[in-house]
Image (tube, grey):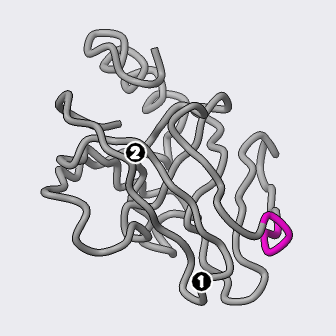
Amino acid sequence: MSTGDDTVWMEGGCHCGAVRFRVRAARDLDVLDCNCSMCSKSGYLHLIVHARDFELLAAASALEEYRFGTETARHLFCRRCGIKSFYVPRSHPEGFSVNARCLDEGQVRSIRVRPYDGRNWEAARERLAREELAAGSPGS
């Protein structure tokens, strides 16, 4: 999710540089800090975008996939350094969740972090869907 109309293409990637991507979002980001078993361990900050606003620039072959639970989400991480810089989330299978922490420095003006109760995923997803519908955001 991003706020404002000043969207730009920003680049990012994994630690070792084998995985590179670009994403179109506002320079003032609105991200989710999820407390589920996966995100709380990795410190992932979710920037949700439509597929049209995401482009893999390098090394699809460098990606490894991990699925758990419902096996809906496609957790993608670099086979070399282990960083998950983006993935296809269960909540938005038509798009991507980009880890805001994996965007290259100097591109983001501000980040608004909102808590997301991923431990109670179904209820949290319903709340988020209502918010996105009201705001006209990516999940709507």
Compared to 5, does 22 lie above or below? below
Q: Residue at x 66, y 89 (%)?
A: 81
- What range of the chain is rendered magenta? 60-64
Q: Secondary structure at mark 2?
A: loop
Which of the image's four quarters has the C terminus? top left
State the image coordinates of residue 61 (x, y, percent, origin top left): 86, 69
- Hey, what amino acid is under mark 2? Asp
Q: x%, y% of residue 122?
A: 55, 30
Res. 17 mark: 1
Left or right: 105 in relation to 60: left
Q: Residue 114: which disc?
A: none
Q: Amino acid at mark 1?
A: Gly
Q: Which residue is mark 2?
A: 117
Residue 58 in magenta? no
* Percent coordinates x, y for residue 132 in the rendering: 35, 19
Q: Residue at the location (78% across, 69% down)? A: 63
Give the camera-side residue of 28 and 84.
28
Q: Nearer the viewer, residue 52 or 101?
A: 52
User: Relative to the observer, which residue lies in front, 18 or 124?
Assistant: 18
**Residue 14: percent from the left, percent from the top?**
56, 77
